Amino acid sequence: MFCRNQTSRATVARGSAMEVKRGRFRLSVLEDSAQDCEVQRLIEREVRIREGASKLLAACSQRDQALEASKTLLTSNSRILALMTQLQRMKEAQAMQRAGRRSSDGASVDERLPCTGKVAISDIRIPLMWKDSEYFKNKGELHRCAVFCLLQLGTEIHDTDLVIVDRTLTDICFDEPVIFTDVPTDFDLRVELYSCCVEEEFSMGSSTRRLSRLGSASSKKFMATLETAASCSSPGGESPVLLLAPSVRSPKYHLLAHKSLTLSHAQNSFRTHDLTISDTEGSLFWLPLYGNMCCRLAAQPFCMTQVVMCGKLRIRSESNPVDWRDVYGVLSGSLLKCYQQQDNTDSLETPLFTIPINKDTCVHATKSDPALHTQSITITNQSGDVTPYTIATHTSEDTHDWMEAFRQHFYDMSQWKQCCNELMKIEEPSPKKMTLTLKQGSLYHEMVTSPSTKTRNHLEPLNRPVSSEIQSLLSTYYNDSY
């Protein structure tokens, strides 16, 4: 009778393990390379936007246009810095991972990670504290500032609309919700309030003349500059070189106050937070902040909104242990929903019954039951007000998968804490205004789109709509140049 040699069997096993490690290593390298390319693509896109904003800023003829262009410039710079920081961290992590794998023969054990989620901040209110003589008696010089909020969570950065503030306002309000996706539990949402004094008129008398001189001949050189910004990268495929913005006279925004919000601040209602003031009353861009910010920070972990596990089950209640029911179970949020069949889950049909799954729930696998030919799962509630249930699956593998799904689900709920007590409501932003439609090959296309997308007939939407002032400027340039 043939018998495999133990030594050769061990050698084959070690060889197979080494091949698996090499395959995983090659796959990891490919994934890291794809992530690097994606981050570099985003950096290049922001560089093009920044260069375009700088050119628009140099051609602005009105103050409102300059304020919007300068705001875009600051936002784009912030995104570039955040992406460059992420790219550097990724390269350091890749280097450490590769060095660790080469020096270790053992396979690393992945730790359990909580699910990500969606975070939204809305209805930002920042109260002002004007002097009595300014607000009630309307005395003194009228102090006016342009302000907006920059919201950063990791590399995802959004800006709010621009608001002009003077002593006639008692609060700075930003109503529109801003939503961040794929957010980890240890998120740090930084809210920054920027201010710019708008008292002085910006001298741009020659801007109109410069704009009219940008005809079809000089526009080619102008487009070539933007193409260079779009394709600027080092020969070795490293991160692109950041181009310095042209030195033009423009409104300057200054950080007025900031606040960092974390998971502990998330709740289903409004909450007041203390602000950190960054400057003093002597500054031109200063505003009499009360020192607080009121907003609503809501979080929806994906374990509360997406299906965690589903499949065919046999369930019985401990109040009627002989009555087994064949159902299709769907674990999502704080409920295990039991439907009569799988087709019912796609409709709005009410499930046959539901089993609460929360922090007070205890789930454990029992020993194999000869009558069921597999292990069963017992679901009990520590508070005692919920009837215990017993779940049986068709195979031992299904039992293992359901137990693992329950373990991961309880871990996710423990990490997201109060966000899993009930599903917090997140309102979607209102529909964006229609963006300007220009002819093919417009200035906006050259500045913010890659060469492969220049043939589109409409503007590519950004994270926020193009302001009416910028659209007007683009239309003027288009008519003069073409």
Image (spheres, grey):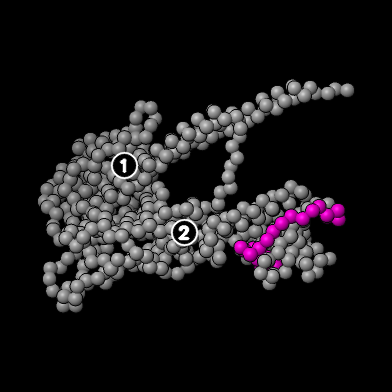
According to the image, label 2 marks what residue?
263
Q: In terms of image quadrants, where is residue 277?
A: bottom left
Callout 1: helix, strand or loop? helix
Q: Residue 49 in the image: x percent, y percent?
A: 31, 45
Q: Residues within 10 Å of mark 1 (few under 14, many from 20)?
A: many
Distance in Å between CA atoms under marks 2 and 1: 34 Å
Q: Where are the magenta residues, as a range?
A: 350-372
Q: Looking at numbered disc 2 in the image, what kind of residue is underneath it?
A: Leu
According to the image, label 1 marks what residue?
48
Residue at image x 75%, y 25%? 9
Q: In terms of image quadrants, where is residue 189?
A: bottom left
Q: Is residue 351 left or right of residue 57?
A: right
- The answer to whether residue 318 is visible is yes
Instruction: Tell which circle, 2 or 1, labels the residue nearer the N-terminal end.
Output: 1
Farthest-out residue, right: 1
Residue at image x 31%, y 42%? 48
Q: Looking at numbered disc 1 in the image, what kind of residue is underneath it?
A: Arg
Front in this rendered view, residue 254 or 472? 254
Residue 133's disc number? none
Callout 2: helix, strand or loop? helix
Q: Nearer the viewer, mark 2 or mark 1?
A: 2
Front in this rendered view, residue 171 or 267? 267
Residue at image x 54%, y 56%? 415
Q: Is residue 355 left or right of residue 221?
A: right
Chief SS of the magenta region = loop
The quarter of the rendered structure image containing the N terminus is: top right
The quarter of the rendered structure image containing the C terminus is: top left
- Is 479 in the magenta? no
Residue at image x 79%, y 22%? 5
